[in-house]
Amino acid sequence: MNLGLKKVLGLASGFCLMIGSLALGQEKRALRPEDLADIRSLSNIQISADGRRVAFVVTEPADPAKPQKPRDTNIWVVPADGSESARLFAASPKSDTHPRWSPDGRYLALLSDRGEPAGDEKETKNQVYLMRTDGGEAEQLTNLKGSVEDLRWSRDGKMIAFTARDPETDAEQKKHKEGYDENFVDHLYKFARLWVLTLAERKAEQVIKQDLHVSGFDWFPDGAELAVRVSSTPRNDDVYWHARVVVVRRLTGEIVRTLSENVAGDARWSPDGQTIAFEEYSPNRIASWLVVAPAAGGPARPLLKDYAGTVRDFEWEADSKHLVAEVNERTRDKFLRVDSGDGSATEIPAETALAGADFAISQDGRVLAYARGNEDHPPDVFSWFRQESPQSTPTGEPMGPRLPRRLTDLNPQSKTWRLGAVKEISWKSKRDGTALYGVLVTPPDFKPAQTYPTIVEVHGGPEWAWWSGWLGSWHEWAQLLASNGYVVFLPNPRGSTGQGWKFAEANRDDWGGGDFRDIMDGVDDLIGQKIADPNRLGIGGWSYGGFMTSWAVTQTNRFQAAVVGAAVTNLFSFDGTTDITPTFLRNYFLDLPFARRADYDNHSAMTFLKNCKTPSLILHGESDERVPTSQGWEFYNGLRMLGVPAEMVTYPREHHGFRERAHQVELLTRLLAWYDKYLKQ
């Protein structure tokens, strides 16, 4: 073991012991912004084919002394049965991610920039590395000029397919050094190309020669072909809404057939090679559903089309007749075992309670490894073993379903926090009686029949949903606010996931209409239950949540404070400046904005800004391509002209999602102070 690895292991174990001692001998305290910024996060869960070991990536807290340095990412391994503690498997001063087990379990392939020059943080490039699982140093398998982005083993373990981004040419590098760094928009694309590495020869060759951007791929069982998700350019608009699934010959790069031109996600080839599963878009390309198609070509057949929930991700079982799907149902994430023939589904007792999918199944389908965060702790690794044969208790009674095993405790410091209680709630639309769901987070000292200052946090999307689980990050404010004395209401109005594709499309051509009324109906319900204080109401959100916040304070004066985060405030100007134009808003508003100017204006907060009286805090990243900072400036400057109390803070280098620790801490500190100023004094 090298000294660097020993140092990391020592620090990790010492950290856990220290926090454990604090938790035993110290009173719990309110959550602080620094606590959320310093959470160790979990991703990329992978299980070995035999189901015995789970690999995953841990992203460590940022170093406050190096505020702009990326957070360290390391690969850990833990036995799936929980018989031993998780151990650090791959660590370096650089980044180690994307662990992938070889089919025989002897190796882990991974991506790392450990070969890059020390101290070079801006131009680092990932390459493919290989490590024996019984010990040894990492072997570098690729040395491309471009960065590798994803990888996947062939079923026989003899090849690794991967995607690598086009590098700058020598001529481009020379120009940039001379100061010619202009961006020629929609030209000179840098495609992600598909490559295949042959392990015996340690040789990589590019598969698809034509200019197509690859955003997903999977192997045919015999390795002769791959199912590939491609788009004509790497522009987000093309990748998200105009991709197709094609079958490619490995040796020639020839595209032999197209399976679908309406693809919403990656394709997965069944183990017997007969069927390919993927997600297709709903009629208005807002929601999606799971489909299966003959690998040889033919129409796709929907699965779970009428399911009252949303599929997040899926994997085939070994029998090629069933898939395991992670789904979002109301405010719960769960797993379903889906029959690929008739579409019937049975629930697997392994609830995830997360915002996004991250799971893996063993080759025989008996073991499931996944991420799960509960209301009292951030996400950890869990496993679940299917009960294959009837078993009995000592009294002869049948045993119940096996319970999930918690395999890690990545954030033991959470035991020192006073946290709010999280529960799913429901109410009905006053307009049409639609059943609506959301999450309520109450303060640790919550007492029934006592009203509290209440903050509505609206989720982004709008095709997304709040969940009943861990709700604490720079973007999820509920636990921070609840721990500091607030009731927090997290509504999933029409337009959200979790209630089927028709519900997800129910706010089409109606942003700020039925969705806004759904939220206010929920607020009224909490006031009627003597939970929310009608004189101390706040609202806030990010992205679409920011849109709804800006809209709400121009439609009603019932809120005493608002936090407008990365908000769409003017649909017309947003559509001309976002990196997801023109398809995103056209899916919702039927046509291009200059063809329906009045309709876009009638759903924009800026049109009704003169009605706003609510003190508003506007927050925005200065490098946000998704919702450009100009959207925040429009709203802020308009409020200043009207004399409405308003403050605006912009964050250098930050895009739509914030990465730098100092910015995350500052944002959370500022919004908490804003709500305290107007709702607690």
Image (tube, helix red, strand yellow):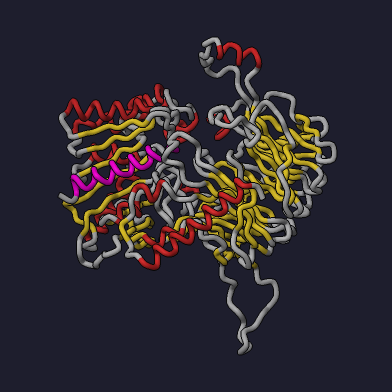
**Residue 339 to residue 223: above or below:** below
Residue 47, horizontal then vertical, whole percent: 66, 56
Between 406 and 289, the one nearer to me in the picture: 406
Residue 361, horizontal then vertical, whole percent: 66, 57
Residue 676 colored magenta?
Answer: yes
Q: Residue drawn 63% across and 44% down? A: 98
Q: Which region is colored magenta?
A: 657-679
Between 35 and 635, the one nearer to me in the picture: 35
Q: In the visual, does 628 lie left or right of 105?
A: left
Residue 186 colored magenta?
Answer: no
**Residue 195 to residue 499: above or below:** above
Q: Residue drawn 66% across and 38% down? A: 260
Residue 562, horizontal then vertical, whole percent: 25, 42
In the image as oriented, which residue stretches furthest toward the right? Answer: 200
Between 65 and 565, the one nearer to me in the picture: 65
Q: In the visual, does 433 lie left or right of 252?
A: left
Prevalent SS, magenta region: helix
